[in-house]
Amino acid sequence: ASFRSREIGLDTLLEDGGHNQVKLLGAAKLEIEPAEFLRFEAGIPAFPSELRDLSIIEADLGAAISSSKGCYVGQEVVERSTALGRPPRLLRVFEIAGKSLPNPGDNLTALGGGATAGRIVSVCRNPNASRILAFISVKNTPEIVEAVNAAGLEIDGQKALPLVKM
């Protein structure tokens, strides 16, 4: 599978004009910007864009962890999250209502409450500029998850709603 979708695919780098030969074989060309937006819509985090500061559990990739192997980098963090029953943060995709593009690192608050509930990890605008999606690292507490599911998040007066309930 490609890292941009859950569909079977292949990412290729071709010399100028090389895509014409591949197209003759029935392959479709997809430019980087639309492919990135599709990746965001599918909720697929990529390294280093979204995964650099997050554990694999926070990114909801726990199925990629083998508990039968020996020691590995980050094992203590994974074991602690497993013992607590939940990771401290969750990486989720939100749609941001508004025209201005937030910046990675910007904080968001829960609507109806002033506390910081998460931060922007990465942002993508679809090619026709009608939608903004963002990977957001959200604090994983019952109060914040409930507030996010009920009303969403806010950044600079713009509402951010999760694509999928937390």
Image (tube, rainbow, N blue to C red):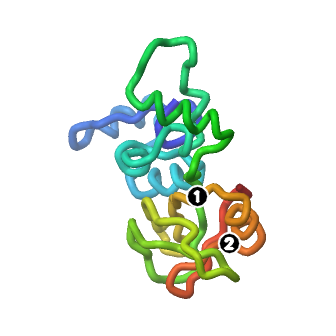
Q: Position of residue 79 (x, y in %)?
A: 55, 30
> Which is closer to the viewer, label 1 or label 2?
2
What residue do we see at 67% from left, 65% from top? Answer: 144
User: Residue, x 63% and y 55% (percent of image)?
Assistant: 140
Left of 153 or right of it: where is 44?
left
Q: Residue 145: image x %, image y %?
A: 70, 61
Quarter of the image that includes the C terminus: bottom right
Image: 121 above or below 160? above
Compare residues 164 and 30 and report the one nearer the observer: 164
Q: Element under label 2?
A: loop
Q: Which mark is residue 93?
A: 1
Dot 1 amino acid type: Val
Amino acid type at image mark 2: Gly
- Seen in the picture, residue 76 relative to 108 is either above or below; the reply is above
Q: Nearer the viewer, residue 9 or 142?
A: 142
Residue beneath disc 2 = 152
